[in-house]
């Protein structure tokens, strides 16, 4: 089998065949999810715990629905941001949960690297549902599936990722995934919202939206992450919309059939015009949400197969 990983912590560690294995299996779950009876038993008997140390609507709901459709016992542990401020506390929480023998642990945390650290301490498969500014692998995978279905391919496309790149784990995971698949990536936004070592990413950088969107196949907008800002990154939201907010006029620079994406939650009238976001001829934002459930089902299914195989080998006394 192409997919051999024990955890899904980031796109960084995935090889292109592993990415394609997830997307191909997800296609089958898209079909299942459109039926009236949506049951599979891929995770039957397994316990899935969702630990969200940061607020989330669609990602948490998506992981919960995905686990339930696959027959897992799903438990949501909603942790208030304020109750977990120290590394020790996070590890203690993880060890406590570990003692309850979960099989899949889905974790979102505000600190970059926290999920990787946790994965070292537990005996189950860990899925990163977003850690700080670091990675958000299932988001990049669901974006890739959405692009592949809309464009019929996942290579040699020009993808413009626009807005608050500096604070975005979505941007980082997408840059890694789309880069591995040999696409042309453009980052578009004000210099204050560009990561410092942007030159190392193998991307083109633009300050002007129309220049950056010229001839693009995919326009991916990002939320202005106010909660991760601590200073004057933008002059005002009105000014930001004027220069960087996606509307029909700026989109006209992209290809005629370019698709518009946004991971949500959206700030309408800040990074994207509300009418454009709702335009079903251009926007695939709702498709992204649909693909999210299918991709998470596929990722958990593949991790569970590896986990069962690993435990089977250990039980048989074979060296792993
Ligand atoms: C993103 C996240 O939390 O990283 N949202 C999501 O998962 N759908 C993007 C964001 O918060 O802007």
Image (cartoon, helix red, strand yellow):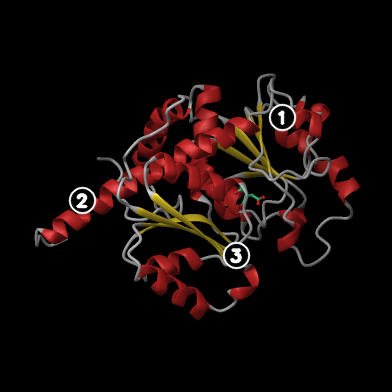
User: Label 2: which residue?
Assistant: 309
C-alpha separation, residue under disc 2 versus residue under disc 3? 32 Å
Q: Is residue 230 visible?
A: yes
Q: Residue furthest left?
A: 317
- State the residue in front, 119 or 31: 31
C-alpha separation, residue under disc 3 versus residue under disc 1? 35 Å
Q: Is residue 175 visible?
A: no
Q: In the drawing, what numbered circle is on residue 251? A: none
* Above or below for 194 versus 229: above
User: Label 1: which residue?
Assistant: 214
> Mark 2 or 1, which is nearer the eye?
2
> Quick check: 74 left or right of 290?
left
Within 10 Å of disc 1 (Cα), the crowding (few <14, some 14-19, many 20+) is: some
Q: Are the residues at dot 2 and dot 1 in contact (C-beta closer than 8 Å)?
A: no
- State the residue in front, 144 or 43: 43
* Above or below for 213 versus 10: above
Q: Earlier in the sequence, mark 3 or mark 1?
A: 3
Q: Position of residue 268 (x, y in %)?
A: 80, 41
Per the image, label 3 sits on a secondary structure element best described as loop
Where is residue 205, by image quadrant?
top right
- State the residue in front, 259 or 93: 93
- State the residue in front, 18 or 183: 18
User: Label 3: which residue?
Assistant: 110
Per the image, label 2 sits on a secondary structure element best described as helix
The residue depicted at 55 percent of the width and 50 percent of the height is 60
The residue depicted at 49 percent of the width and 80 percent of the height is 88
> Mark 3 or 1, which is nearer the eye?
3
Within 10 Å of disc 2 (Cα), the crowding (few <14, some 14-19, many 20+) is: few
Q: Position of residue 122 (x, y in %)?
A: 35, 68
């Amino acid at each position: 089998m192409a997919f051999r990983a024990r955890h899904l912590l980031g796109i960084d560690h995935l090889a292109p065949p592993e990415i394609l294995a997830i997307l191909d299996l997800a296609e089958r779950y898209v079909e299942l999810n459109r039926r009236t009876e949506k049951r599979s038993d891929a995770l039957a008997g397994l316990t899935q715990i969702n630990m969200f140390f940061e607020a989330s609507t669609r990602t948490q709901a998506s992981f919960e629905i995905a686990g339930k459709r696959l027959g897992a016992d799903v438990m949501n542990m909603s942790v208030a941001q304020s109750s977990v401020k120290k590394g020790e506390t996070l590890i203690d929480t993880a060890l406590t949960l570990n003692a309850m023998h979960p099989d899949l642990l889905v974790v979102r945390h505000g600190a970059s690297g926290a999920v990787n650290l946790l994965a070292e301490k537990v005996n189950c498969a860990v899925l990163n549902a977003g850690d700080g500014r670091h990675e958000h692998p299932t988001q990049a995978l669901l974006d890739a599936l959405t692009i592949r279905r809309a464009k019929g391919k996942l290579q040699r496309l020009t993808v413009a990722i626009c807005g608050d790149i500096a604070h975005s784990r979505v941007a980082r995971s997408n840059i890694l995934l789309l880069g591995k698949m040999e696409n042309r990536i453009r980052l578009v936004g004000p210099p204050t919202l560009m990561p410092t070592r942007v030159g190392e990413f193998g991307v083109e950088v633009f300050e002007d939206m129309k220049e950056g969107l010229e001839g693009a196949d995919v326009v991916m907008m990002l939320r202005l992450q106010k909660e991760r800002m601590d200073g004057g990154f933008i002059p005002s939201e009105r000014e930001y919309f004027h220069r960087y907010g996606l509307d029909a006029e700026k989109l006209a620079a992209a290809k005629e059939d370019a698709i518009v994406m946004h991971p949500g939650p959206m700030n309408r009238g800040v990074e994207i015009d509300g009418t454009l976001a709702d335009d079903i001829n251009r926007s695939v934002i709702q498709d992204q949400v649909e693909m999210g459930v299918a991709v998470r089902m596929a990722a958990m299914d593949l991790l569970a197969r590896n986990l069962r195989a690993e435990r089977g080998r250990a039980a048989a006394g074979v060296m792993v």
